[in-house]
Image (cartoon, grey):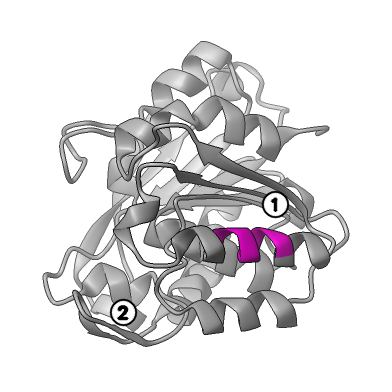
Amino acid sequence: MIETWNVTIPELTGEEERRAYLYLPESYESRPERRYPVLYMFDGHNVFFDEDATYGKSWGMKEFMDASETQLIIAAVECNHHPDGGRLNEYSPFSFRDSRFGSVTGKGKLTMRWMIRSFKSYIDQNYRTLSDREHTFIAGSSMGGLMSLYAVLSYNRFFSRAAALSPSLWTHPAAIDHMVKRAAVGPDTIVYMDYGSEEFANHDGMQKQFRRTAGALADKGVYVTSRVVPHGDHSEASWEKQIPIFMETLLYDL
């Protein structure tokens, strides 16, 4: 079952509304005594429904969750669609310049503050969640993948596990290296990170940066699963194929 409603993020876009999505497992109604882990996801409009997805193809998370009977709540929020780099600004932990996108003002900290203080608080207050860090995860792709890394490293007291698919490590390599190096993470932190073999060529130095980030995470004591997806590209269709793998990583040993 998926519930949808409109939310506002005053710190970022004032009273402008965007859609929130919540997946509840089938047992949620039949097992009123049960509480569930929660996976927070970026780009919520791309997670469940093809008709809402930016390019007409979603991840198909509902189909996977129903078929696998995975007992997990998924909470996701639509991104900023403003053509002046709204999504890039909100989904970047730091400011940077790029020849293609120009100047990006990193508002990732504001995004995460809202997600934790407002959105997570609302979900925990209104649904039967396991709200502790051990049972709270985060995931996304591309800029959402970068934000997932940022969230689990910089807000580790709230998130213990993350899945970063095709994370945008090209945005500011030096800042990313520093972010990993300075992170104070718990010894049980788990990160799944992948990149499609066909998308490495999209940005200079991506293979090197991907290997460096994965190694730095391991050096921090993070339980990191790092994959290069054979023939994988930068698309929802490719990320959908990785769902069984990253979900197994997120839910391992719970």
In which quadrant of the rendered image does the C terminus lie? top right
Check residue 211 for magenta coloring.
yes
Where is residue 206? Give x, y as percent: 45, 62
In which quadrant of the rendered image does the N terminus lie? top left
Q: Distance of mark 2 from mark 1, alpha carbons?
A: 25 Å
Magenta residues (range): 210-215
Q: Tell which of 234 and 157 is nearer to you.
A: 234
Disc on the earlier residue, 2 or 1: 2
Residue in the picture at 39% in, 32% down: 231
Residue under pointer 2: 12
- With respect to residue 231, does 103 lie above or below? below
Where is residue 89? Give x, y as percent: 31, 77
Residue 228 left/right relative to 152: left
Residue 51 left/right relative to 119: left
Which is closer to the viewer, label 2 or label 1?
Answer: 2
Q: Residues within 10 Å of mark 2 (few under 14, many from 20)?
A: some
- With respect to residue 46, does 29 lie above or below? above
Residue in the picture at 22% in, 33% down: 57
- With respect to residue 197, does 172 lie above or below? below
Q: Tell which of 169 and 45 is nearer to you.
A: 169
Where is residue 39? Give x, y as percent: 57, 45
Mark on residue 131?
1
Tell me the SS state at disc 2. Answer: helix
Query: For the residue marked with disc 1, what is the amino acid?
Result: Ser
